Amino acid sequence: MSPARRAVLVLAFALSLAACERDSYLPEGTAAILDKAEVEEDGTKSLAVQYSVRNSGRSAIALSTVSFGFATDARRYYFSDTQALSLPAGGVVYLSARLAYYAATESADLSSVEILGAFFE
């Protein structure tokens, strides 16, 4: 094999590896809290959260999991919301999640509501 042909093959191989870079096809996104409220329905108090998921990557997001934390006057709560999506690159979707308290006598500290993490597939 001639040196020129070998150089062309090495260059083609290197370019194909760069094109298949793992980070280029893994979904990337961000989640943000838009609003939160304490709601009561049929004697059960809950925290309701409205949030957005924005696709900041190059590939579509098919599934998102966003984990939240917040405190009431009695304890700290943790929960995750998983949604099946079809969110193209650059897209944004608005979602809501709700978690009932253990006791109807609890009251949420709305300033404590936070996103603990987010995972996208």
Image (tube, rainbow, N blue to C red):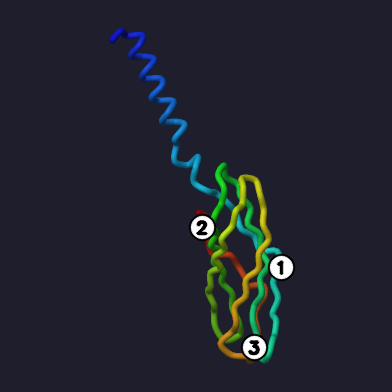
Instruction: Characterize the local packing of mark 1: few (<14), some (14-19) or many (20 or more) Cα atoms within 10 angstroms.
Output: few
Along the line of sight, which residue is nearer the eye, 115 or 14?
14
Where disc 3 sits, the SS reads strand
Between the residue at mark 3 and the residue at mark 1, the CA separation in whole angstroms equals 20 Å
Residue ID for mark 2:
119
Residue located at (69% from left, 80% from top): 38
Q: Real-space Cα distance between discs 2 and 1?
A: 20 Å
Residue type marked 3: Thr
Badge 3 vs badge 2, beta-carbon distance below 8 Å: no
Disc marking residue 35: 1
Mark seen at residue 44: 3
Of labels 2 and 1, earlier in sequence is 1
Q: What residue type is labelled 2?
A: Phe
- Residue 83, placed above or below residue 111: above
* Distance Cα–Cα, label 3 vs label 2: 30 Å
Percent x, y for residue 62?
A: 54, 54
x and y percentages locating residue 90 in the rendered image: 65, 46
Relative height, residue 119 to residue 5 (above, below): below
Task: Find residue 18 and name its label.
Answer: none
Q: Which of marks 3 and 1 is in front?
A: 3
For image coordinates 53% across by 74% down, the residue present is: 78
Query: Which element is circle 2 on?
Result: strand
Residues packed near mark 3 inside 10 Å, few (<14), some (14 to 19) or many (20 plus): few
Residue name at image x 63 percent, y 57 percent? 53
